[in-house]
Image (cartoon, coloured by chain):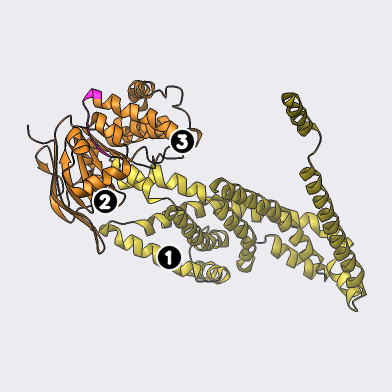
Chain colours: A yellow, B orange
Amino acid sequence: MADASSQDRAAASSTAPTRRALYEAGVRRRANRIALISTLSVIVAIFVLVPLAPGWEAVQKSFFNGRVFAATFPGLLDAFVLNVMIFAWSAPLIALTGLAIALCRDARAPALFPLRLFGIAYTDIFRGLPVVLVIYIIGFGVPGLGLPRPWNSPYIWGTLALVLVYSAYVAEVIRSGIDSIHQSQRSAAASLGLSDRDTMRYVVLPQAIRNVVPANMNLFIALQKDVALLSFIGPVEVFRQAGVYKSLYANFTPYVGAALIFLALTIPATRYADYLMNKQNKARR
Amino acid sequence: MSAKLSLRGVRKRFGDHEVCKGIDLEVAEGEMVCLIGASGSGKSTLLRCMNLLEPIDDGSIWLDGVDISEPGLNRQPVRQKIGIVFQSYNLFPHMTAAENVMLAPRRVKGQTRDALRPRVEALFTRFGLGDRMEHYPDQLSGGQQQRVAIIRALAMQPEIMLFDEITSALDPELVGEVLDVLRDLRAEGMTMVLATHEMGFARELADKVCFLDAGRILEQAPPEALFSNPREPRTKAFLARVL
């Protein structure tokens, strides 16, 4: 008898929700309702209140002008291809340079001390300067040497400036990844007779780099935005193209168009980086 | 018979704390020596000194009549001859079990995967892991991981194996499978030094048991003598607590 009733209970629990499940579902429904109502009221407030501002009409005309938007958006997209290209050839260079600098900073042999010093100086200097300043100094300075074409191209020197700055940050991230690998992994490698070099290459680095993928993704999202800074030294990428349109139409709407293009790329990338980060945090717990 | 490995007056300090206070120990070829003693008595540190993971401050360590504690000596050839297995396994988590085992023979001895494969497969099969070679460490139980760690050390064909409390992190039901591996190696005549809390195991298989207390070997004797008839009061007190 007792057997049969416990079987009943087991069967019931697999189909009907338990008291606790019912209670939690109720709590969840209420929380969702409250979140929805508060979000909607904020949105309504913005749409109702902002147009009541005295300067709204002027702002609408100069920033959210549908006609100008339609006329300029295709041109902005074309210009954005240049951003993507500059990003595409900078990113691998940054990854490689960052890794090299991180390894320089980790060099332990006395003969390599200059390398270590270089690594420290490099990261200190380039993390300490505004990106736009480095772009100005290199982008205007180096071509001033009067080099022959194509060596006076702002693309080359602008890219170099981005690589210098961003690889300093990437190097620091990779180094933190190297530090995060537990000493016992190095002990295990050493006890098998592996050299320091092989220990780094086969044991420490593969784990370190895997650990810092999400952090580096955030850096590369920032890089995608900072490509726009190259417009200051010449290349007509999306930001500069928006400026050209602004002058042409005497209207700021092209800037909003450019902003939308950036967001279309950076928001999914940011979400993905967060997703990776969360996954990693969960795996560690 | 001259000793395979001998420690003479070995001292090791971490900062102000002296962990080994002059240790003398002889390990003969094919012998199994067990180090017992409370946590913090210096067992692990002593093992780490033996394969030069920790530099010693004073005294000397001799392998086949050569002083391997000479400062500045190239440590890699020594470590190839002395394998160590750690309490926490320390497998490389980003490699399969087979890759864990083959890394050192490939990189240090320049052997190819193809040449290694039969020998590595034989080792895995011998220790009951024939179907686990392509698993990653986090897909294996603690006992399986520890056996892979032992295989990894054996793949370098060491002359001496050191075991640092290799069953201490394992669930009780997994201890047996790892001890079986040690029995197997013992039967094969491997020279071994174990730091262990498995008193029954030490009693069954060791040639010599050393009781460490506060960085000194207080007493060393064959297991029967040490376990049934300890000379030192501290040894008696320790055994009374653990047996």
Label 3 to label 1, Cα distance in Å?
38 Å
Are the two marked residues, 2 and 1, in contact with CB atoms closer than 8 angstroms?
Answer: no
User: Residue A217 at x, y = what percent?
Assistant: 58, 53
Q: Judge from the rendering whether residue B126 lies leftward or rightward of residue A59; answer left or right.
A: left
Q: Residue at x 38, y 29 (%)?
A: B176
- Determine the CA span between mark 2 and mark 1: 46 Å
Instruction: Please give the label number shown on residue A122.
Output: 1
- Left or right: B161 with respect to B91? left
Same chain for the residues under marks 2 and 3 in the image: yes
Q: Specify whether disc 3 shares its chain with disc 1.
A: no
Residue B137, numbered label: 3
Element type at mark 3: helix
Q: Is residue B189 magenta?
A: yes
Q: Name the residue at 29% across, 48% down.
A: B38
Task: Give the letter of the chain under mark 2.
Answer: B
Chain part drawn in magenta:
B187-195
Amino acid type at image mark 1? Tyr
